[in-house]
């Protein structure tokens, strides 16, 4: 079963909750959906991000973005700090990196696991000015804008102030996030799409953030804009432990962060989870999510 793939030390403290118990747990462990709070905020989020982040992929993306030794780099909404550490290695010798995140828990985790001379972690609200941080040669924004559907362009405008003239702004996000499957039972597909639609409207989540990145840089007059597209999630065959953990957390949010009734399932929430379990652990299953990378140079006035 899906739950069997996840290390007990990493998963929810309630292994077989009823729907009501699970909702109560989420109320305790997740922030509400007001004031633009991060949708996935919870005690295991830094661990989830650590597990799912591939150092070599981050390195490849950063080199595409134009990172070089000696640069002064800002990593916006760094999550666990793992990405910040990869960026730091790429700007050596003589480079520095500042990681900015709105979560105190993320800052504490990053300092503990990735803190070192040359890396600084700060807690800042990305909806507010960054004036005191100065400017940077490269500003890196990866998997951020999808959580701020209504404010995404305003956030990019705010972040753009951190880019020095001639510097690089790199935006990276998913497109059609968690919505590309083959082999789904029809009612499971309908339920997943219905849940995502509610999350868009009620939780400010944007599963189509990636396709908007080019227009953001274009509208801000960035120059020499370039775009790359690749696959992010690409899951087939035997399910890997890290994918089981990552997607279980996603489904928890999809199914319980919102008030969805699971009307097509006689057993309600439990019936939905059981059917998703059967689908996702089946090695015949195929799912993927495109990732879109966009970079540009800030004009020198």
Image (cartoon, rainbow, N blue to C red):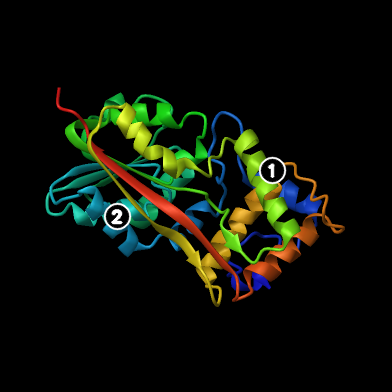
Q: Secondary structure at mark 2?
A: helix
Residue drawn where x is 37% and y is 51% of the image: 81
Q: Is residue 287 left or right of residue 222?
A: right
According to the picture, the residue beneath numbered tag 2 turns out to be 61
Residue drawn where x is 69% and y is 43% of the image: 27
Asked if the residues shown at circle 2 and circle 1 are in contact, with their CB atoms under 8 angstroms apart, the answer is no
- Please report whichever mark, 2 or 1, sits nearer to the chain's N-terminal start: 1
Residue 38, position as x, y percentages in the image: 53, 40
Residue lying farthest to the right in this orientation: 266
Residue 164, position as x, y percentages in the image: 19, 31
Q: Nearer the viewer, residue 165 or 217?
A: 217
Q: Nearer the viewer, residue 278 or 51?
A: 278
Residue 250, position as x, y percentages in the image: 59, 54
**Label 2 crowding class (10 Å Cα cut-off): few <14, some 14-19, many 20+?**
some
Residue 95, position as x, y percentages in the image: 16, 48
Residue 16: quadrant of the picture: bottom right
Q: Is residue 70 left or right of residue 271?
A: left
Where the C terminus falls, by quadrant?
top left
Where the N terminus falls, by quadrant?
bottom right
Q: Is residue 149 left or right of residue 231?
A: right
Residue 299: quadrant of the picture: top left
**Label 1 crowding class (10 Å Cα cut-off): few <14, some 14-19, many 20+?**
few
Q: Is residue 277 positioned above or below 180 on the image?
A: below
User: Residue 27 shows which numbered tag?
Assistant: 1
Q: Secondary structure at mark 1?
A: helix
Q: Is residue 93 visible?
A: yes
Q: Nearer the viewer, mark 2 or mark 1?
A: 2
């Amino acid at each position: 079963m899906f739950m069997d793939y996840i290390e007990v030390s990493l998963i929810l403290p309630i292994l077989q909750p009823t729907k009501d118990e699970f909702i109560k747990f989420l109320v305790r462990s997740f922030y509400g959906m007001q004031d633009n709070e991060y949708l996935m905020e919870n005690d295991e989020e830094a661990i989830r991000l650590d597990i799912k982040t591939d150092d070599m992929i981050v390195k490849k993306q950063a080199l595409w973005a134009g990172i070089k030794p000696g640069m002064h780099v800002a990593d916006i909404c760094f999550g666990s700090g793992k990405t910040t550490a990869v960026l730091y290695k790429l700007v050596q010798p003589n480079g520095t990196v500042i990681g900015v995140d709105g979560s105190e828990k993320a800052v504490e985790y990053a300092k503990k696991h990735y803190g070192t001379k040359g890396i600084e972690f700060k807690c800042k609200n990305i909806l507010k000015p960054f004036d005191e941080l100065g400017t940077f040669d490269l500003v890196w924004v990866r998997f951020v804008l999808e959580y701020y559907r209504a404010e995404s362009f305003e956030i990019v405008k705010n972040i753009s102030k951190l880019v020095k003239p001639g510097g690089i702004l790199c935006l990276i996000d998913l497109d059609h996030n968690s919505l590309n499957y083959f082999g789904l039972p029809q009612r499971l597909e309908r339920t997943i799409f219905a849940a995502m639609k509610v999350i868009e409207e009620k939780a400010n989540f944007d599963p189509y953030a990636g396709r908007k990145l080019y227009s953001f840089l274009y509208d801000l007059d960035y120059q020499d804009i370039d775009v790359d597209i690749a696959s992010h999630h690409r899951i087939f065959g035997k399910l890997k432990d890290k994918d089981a953990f990552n997607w279980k957390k996603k489904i928890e949010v999809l199914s319980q962060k919102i008030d969805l009734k699971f009307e097509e399932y006689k057993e309600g929430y439990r019936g939905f989870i059981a059917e998703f379990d059967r689908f996702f652990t089946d090695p015949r299953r195929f799912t993927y999510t495109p990732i879109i990378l966009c970079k540009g140079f800030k004009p020198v006035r």
